[in-house]
Image (cartoon, helix red, strand yellow):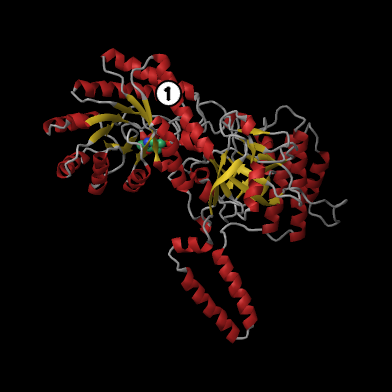
Amino acid sequence: AELYGINEWGGGYFKIDNNGDVMVMPSPGCVKRAVSIREIVEGIEARGLGMPVLLRIENILDSQIAALNDCFLAAMQELDYKGTFQGAYPIKVNQQQQVIEEITHYGSKYHHGLEAGSKAELIAAMGMMTDKKAPLICNGYKDEEFVDLALYATKIGYKCIMVLEMPGELPLIIERSRKLNATPILGVRIKLATQAGGHWGESGGERSIFGLNTTQIIAAVDYLKQEGMLESLQLLHYHLGSQISNIREIRTAVNEACRVFAGLVQEGAQLKYLDLGGGLAVDYDGSQSNFLSSRNYTLNEYCTDIVEAVMTSLDETGVPHPTIITESGRALVAYYSMLLFNVLDVTQFQPDPLPEELPEKCPPQIKYMYDTLHTLSVRNIQECFNDTIYYRDEVRQLFNHGKITLRQRSLAEKIFWTTINEIARVSKELKHVTPEISDIERALSDIYYCNFSVFQSLPDAWAIDQLFPVMPIHRLNEEPIRNAIIADITCDCDGKIDHFIDRHDIKRFLPLHELNDSQEYYLGAFLVGAYQETLGDLHNLLGDTNVVTIRVLDNGEYEFVGELEGDSVSDILSYVEYDPKRLLVRFRKTAERAVRKGNITAQERREIMQAYEMGLRGYTYFER
Ligand code: PLP
C-alpha cells in the first residue's frame, strides 16, 4: 500500500487485503463489503469477455454524489446559510448512458441535476431526467434549435436554465420565447479576472473563450429591462477551469463572482442561483498538494470555504443567500471507473554474459571499456560512467566508418550495458549521486507490454501528461522486484506510460512483479472515470474496450449489472467508412484469384476466409 500510495489517492474506496489483492469498497472505508478486483476479473473472463476491460463500480458514483451534496448541506447548516445547494452534473465529463441514468436516479434524492453543453447533451438530458426540481443548465453556443428545445423543456416544467455565453444569444432567445409563448429562465456566464493555474485554467480569465465581460453584462441587463424580461435573469455562472489544485484560487473566484452577483441584484435582477461551474479537483497522486495532479484541500474545506466566502461577500451587501450550484464532473465520476489490462510481454535491459577473456584482435577502445568495468568501485563511479560512455561513442563512430566489425560492436555494447548495470548496483551504496547516475535506474527499467491503447483509454496521459495511479491488482504480498515503464499495443512511440504518481515528485518507473508462465499478470489504471472515455480515439484502429459494471450488495456480494462488448474490428472499420461486407467480397475475390493461379488450394481458401471473417467479428485488442 505504501509503495503504490493507494491509501492516499484511493479516496477510501480501495485497499490491499492479506492475499495481496486490491479490494474495492462501495463507500469509503466500508471494509465489510470490500470485493477483490482480481476475483471480478476472473468472473469477467469466465463470462467470455477478454481484457482490457473498463470496470465501473456503480455504488462509487452514488457515494460521490452523496458526499458532495451532504458536505455542502452540512457546511450550510453549520454556518447558518439561508440558501441551499444543488449539483448539476456536466454531461461532457462522461456521457455514457449508464452514468447519466445513475446520476439522475440516485441524484434525485438531492435534486442533483445536469449540465448540457450542446444540443445532443440537452436531448440526452431531457430524455433521462424526470426530476423537475433539479436544475438543467444549458451552457454552450446555442442555435435556434437548441434555444427552442430549452424553451420546450421549461414549458414542460423542467428547471431549465439557459446560460448566455455570448451577447448575441439574447435577441434570439427573446424572439423564440415570444414565438413559442414560453417564459425563459436565463443565466449569464461571466468572464472573471481571476485565472487559475494548471492545464485547464484558461476557462477563466479575460481571454477565456466564453462568457460576458462586465460591459456586456450591463448591456444584457439593459436589453432585458427594455424588453420587460429582467425577471427571467435568475442565475450567474462562471467556470474557472477543471482540476483547480489551489483552494486560494477557488476562494478568490467566488469573491469576485459574488461582487458581480450583488451588482446585478442592485441593477434589479432577481437572481436566485450562483453557479460556480466545475473545478473541484481529484487527488490523483495522493500528495494533497497544489501539484497539477492533486489538490491542497479536502471536500469539506472546498464546501465550507465556498459557503463562507459567499456569505461573507453577500452579507456585506444585504443580498439574500442564493442557491449555490456547482457543476462538478471530474470529482463525481473519476473514482468510479478503472481500466484493467493484462501484461503480454516484457523487455528487460539485462546485459548478455561476457566472455571470460577478450578476443586477441580487439580494438583498444573495447579493451579500455573492459578495464573500466573491472576497476569500477564506489570511489571511481563517476569516472567509470564518463569513460564507458566516451568509449562506447567512439566504438559507434569507428563502426560507422567501417573500422570495427558488427561482432566487435556487439561485444562493446554488451560490456557497456554490463558496466551500466554495475554502476546502478554500486551507486546504491552511495548517499549522493549525480543526476546522470540516478537516472540510470530509469534507463535500465524494463518495458512491460500491456494489452490496451493509451490513446483510446487514457488519452489525457498522452495528450497532456496527466498522471493516473497505475498498479498491479494482485500479488501485492510479493515484493515487486522489477522497475518498469508501460507500453501499449499501438505501434506508436507515444503509446506508453513512463511517468507515474508519487507523493513528492513524479516517478519515472513503476515497481512491478516478474512475470510467471503459470499466471496472467493484471494491472489497473485507476480514477479514469472522468473525460477519458469520451476523449479516447481510434489510433491504430483499437476501439472501445469491453465495459463491465458491478454493484456491491449490502451483504458484500456483488452482481454484474451491465456488460457492454467492446468494438469489434468490423465496428471500427465502419467508423472509418469501410463497408465490412464489401471488404469481405473483395477479399474473397482476391483469394479466388490466388486459387486460380495455384498459390492456394480451394480448401486453403476456405480456411483463410474463415480466419478473415473471424477477424472481422473479433475484438480489436490482443486475444489469447
Ligand atoms: N462546467 C463547465 C462549463 C465546464 O466547461 C466543465 C469542464 O471543464 C465542467 C463544468 C466540469 O468541470 P470539472 O470536471 O472540473 O468538475
Q: Farthest residue toward the top?
A: 316
The residue lying at 18 percent from left, 23 percent from top is 268
Residue 140, position as x, y percentages in the image? 31, 41
**Which of the pair 612/290 is nearer the observer?**
612
Viewer-proximal residue among 438 and 506: 506
Residue with the mark numbered 1:
72
Ligand 1 lies under 8 Å from the Cβ of mark 1: no
- Residue shown at 75% from the left, 34% from the top: 427
Q: Quadrant of ligand 1?
A: top left
419 on left or right of 470 = right
Q: Does residue 382 appear left or right of residue 618 in this picture?
A: right
Q: Is 315 above or below relative to 458?
A: above
Image location (x, y in percent) of residue 220 = 19, 32
Q: Is residue 266 placed above or below 482 in the rendered structure?
A: above
Q: Which residue of the protein is positioned furthest toward the front in this rendering?
A: 555
Is residue 340 or residue 200 the one in the foreground? 340
Which amino acid is tagged 1? Phe
Q: Residue 191 sits in which quadrant?
A: top left
Where in the figure is residue 226, as x and y percent of width and height? 11, 32
Q: Report the number of discs.
A: 1
Q: Is residue 148 left or right of residue 28?
A: left
Q: Is residue 194 visible?
A: no
Q: Secondary structure at mark 1?
A: helix
| Residue 607 in the image, given as x and y percentages of width and height | 63, 75
Left or right of residue 240, residue 432 in this image: right
Residue farthest to the right?
356
Q: Is residue 176 visible?
A: yes
Q: Quadrant of the N terminus?
A: top right
**Measured along the vertical axis of the image, is residue 321 above or below residue 382?**
above
